[in-house]
Image (cartoon, rainbow, N blue to C red):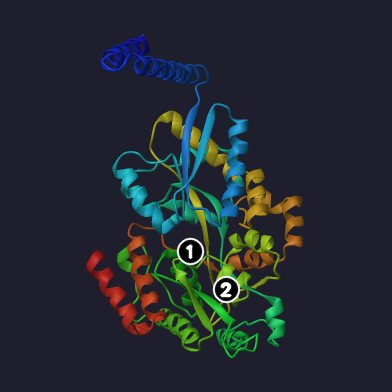
């Protein structure tokens, strides 16, 4: 009835306006208008009918999955869910890299218009919990069959203040990808196991390969910029040299220690030495995850993770992986993203958790792992014949699985983004030659003290 009244009002307005024009034009406009009006009313009434008869719950997933090939894998899995659940339809939206997502996420939360699901690294949990934006998942998981299938080592990434606020989507860590053919051409027969061996290998791999007198192949690519990816790939070096990001129990951002952190100083000095040797190149700012330079042979090594596997396979080049070289002890950084469920409506929250269960399931995790290289979070998936066969075909992944036992997690508390930003600024300043490691970390500590103390 309301639609009919609305249409009648529009029709009267049209006649009043267009009858003052020339007759032929008025008839033309009238016919076009009535056709558009009919289609508009039909579409509205049709949507009302579909919504009321099928009771479809529409939910949105925000993510920053990269590279694009991995996004295609995710979309296929989302489509598979939508086809199997006519009562729930998930819209998967790429909203940029994680550093780019933060302003959008906070604006959405403050504006009371958050997505239903967010794909993000676990460090954001404390901030979103303090904003009252998330729903706790303890009770929902307690009644879910997937709870027993989640790798127990990942529960620390799901918890904040003794409650569960997310479910793992995928896990990973970083190692060093390299081109075996370039190693052979440079006469390198043993893989680097220590920092010094890595530095010497980078020197041998920095070459003029076409005889024009110009260096056209460098040993290594390091991430440029001050974003989280730069921090993420640098942290294993800090931990390997005995450094710690937080002191004591590390319960808050005030416990972060950067100044006089000897492990951090050593790790920054090592990266600076690689740049000073002219054996390492910096990526474009905030593009350290891109592997184009490794693929085209401009560099022979790059620190990245299993998410690069699919893109490297597609390129057709030769490649392999070795663990992060050791200074004092083996170390890597535990990465991966979790799914966070926002407070919306009971119907949407229920639908969002159903999709979250699907992403944790063995079938989803196996297909995601085979398509992207991500390490499965589901124990059954890792043990499945299909995944074991995949490991035999892709031995590079075994490096990440074996290295995971030496993994360290980034702290989960409000303010981690400030810590990452300050640390990222310090790394960038050192790699650009604007500061010494000691001075850069001292300034980073001063910024953090002003914020948190």
**Label 2 crowd (10 A; few <14 / some 14-19 / many >=20):** many
Q: Which residue is identified by label 2? A: 302
Which quadrant holds the N terminus? top left
Quadrant where the C terminus is found in the figure: bottom left
Point 42% across, 19% down: residue: 32
Instruction: Name the front one of labels 2 and 1.
Output: 2
| Secondary structure type for disc 1 | loop
Q: Is residue 236 visible?
A: yes
Where residue 272 sits in the image (x, y, percent)? Answer: 45, 84
Residue 247 is at least partly visible in this image = no
- Residue sitting nearer the eye, 110 or 429: 429
Quarter where residue 205 is shown: bottom right
Q: Is residue 303 left or right of residue 309?
A: left
Image coordinates of residue 216 in percent, x first then y, are 58, 82
Say which residue label 1 marks: 409
Relative side of 394 to 142, left or right? right
Is the residue 19 above or below the residue 433 in the image? above
In the image, residue 423 above or below residue 70? below
Q: CA distance from mark 2 to mark 1?
A: 21 Å
Report x, y in % for residue 70: 59, 53
Q: Nearer the viewer, residue 186 or 3?
A: 3
Answer with mark 2 or mark 1, whichever residue precedes in sequence.
2
* Residue at 34%, 83% in the rendered image: 435
Element marked by disc 2 = strand
Q: Quadrant of residue 251?
A: bottom left
Looking at the image, residue 246 lies above or below residue 280: above
Give percent across and percent down for residue 102: 37, 54
The residue lying toward the viewer, choosing from 451 and 142, is 451
Mark number, residue 319: none
* Quarter location, residue 215: bottom right
Mark 1: few/some/many CA within 10 Å (<14, 14-19, 20+): some
């Amino acid at each position: 009835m309301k639609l009919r009244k609305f249409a009648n009002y529009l029709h009267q307005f049209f006649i009043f306006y267009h009858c003052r024009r020339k007759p032929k034009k008025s008839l033309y406009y009238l016919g076009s208008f009535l056709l558009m009006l009919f289609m508009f009313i039909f579409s509205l009434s049709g949507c009302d009918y579909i919504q009321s008869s099928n009771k479809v719950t529409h939910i949105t997933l925000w993510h920053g999955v990269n590279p694009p090939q991995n996004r295609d894998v995710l979309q296929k899995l989302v489509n598979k869910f939508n086809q199997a659940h006519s009562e729930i339809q998930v819209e998967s939206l790429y909203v940029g890299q994680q550093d780019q997502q933060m302003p959008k996420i906070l604006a959405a939360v403050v504006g009371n218009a958050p997505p239903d699901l967010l794909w993000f690294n676990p460090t954001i949990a404390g901030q979103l919990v303090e904003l009252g934006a998330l729903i706790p998942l303890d009770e929902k998981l307690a009644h879910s069959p997937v709870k027993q299938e989640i790798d127990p080592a990942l529960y620390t990434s799901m918890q904040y203040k003794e409650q569960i606020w997310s479910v793992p989507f995928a896990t990973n860590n970083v190692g060093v990808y390299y081109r075996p053919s370039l190693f052979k051409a440079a006469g390198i027969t043993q893989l680097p196991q220590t920092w010094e061996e890595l530095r010497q290998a980078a020197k041998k791999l920095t070459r003029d390969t076409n005889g024009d007198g110009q260096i056209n192949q460098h040993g290594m690519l390091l991430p440029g910029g001050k974003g989280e990816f730069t921090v993420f790939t640098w942290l294993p070096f800090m931990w390997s040299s005995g450094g710690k990001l937080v002191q004591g129990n590390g319960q808050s951002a005030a416990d972060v220690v950067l100044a006089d952190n000897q492990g951090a100083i050593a790790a920054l000095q090592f990266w600076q030495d690689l740049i000073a040797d002219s054996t390492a190149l910096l990526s474009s700012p905030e593009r350290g995850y891109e592997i184009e330079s490794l693929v085209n042979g401009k560099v022979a090594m790059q620190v990245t993770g299993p998410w690069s596997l699919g893109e490297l396979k597609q390129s057709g080049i030769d490649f392999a992986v070795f663990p992060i070289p050791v200074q004092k002890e083996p170390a890597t950084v535990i990465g991966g993203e979790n799914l966070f469920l926002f407070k919306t409506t009971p119907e949407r929250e229920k639908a969002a958790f159903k999709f979250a269960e699907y992403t944790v399931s063995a079938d989803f995790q196996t297909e995601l792992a085979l398509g992207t290289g991500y390490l499965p979070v589901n124990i059954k998936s890792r043990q499945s014949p299909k995944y074991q066969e995949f490991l035999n075909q892709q031995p590079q992944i075994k490096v990440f699985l074996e290295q995971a036992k030496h993994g360290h997690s980034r702290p989960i508390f409000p303010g981690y983004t400030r810590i990452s930003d300050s640390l990222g600024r310090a790394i960038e300043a050192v790699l650009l030659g604007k500061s010494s490691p000691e001075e850069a970390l001292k300034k980073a500590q001063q910024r953090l003290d002003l914020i948190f103390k």
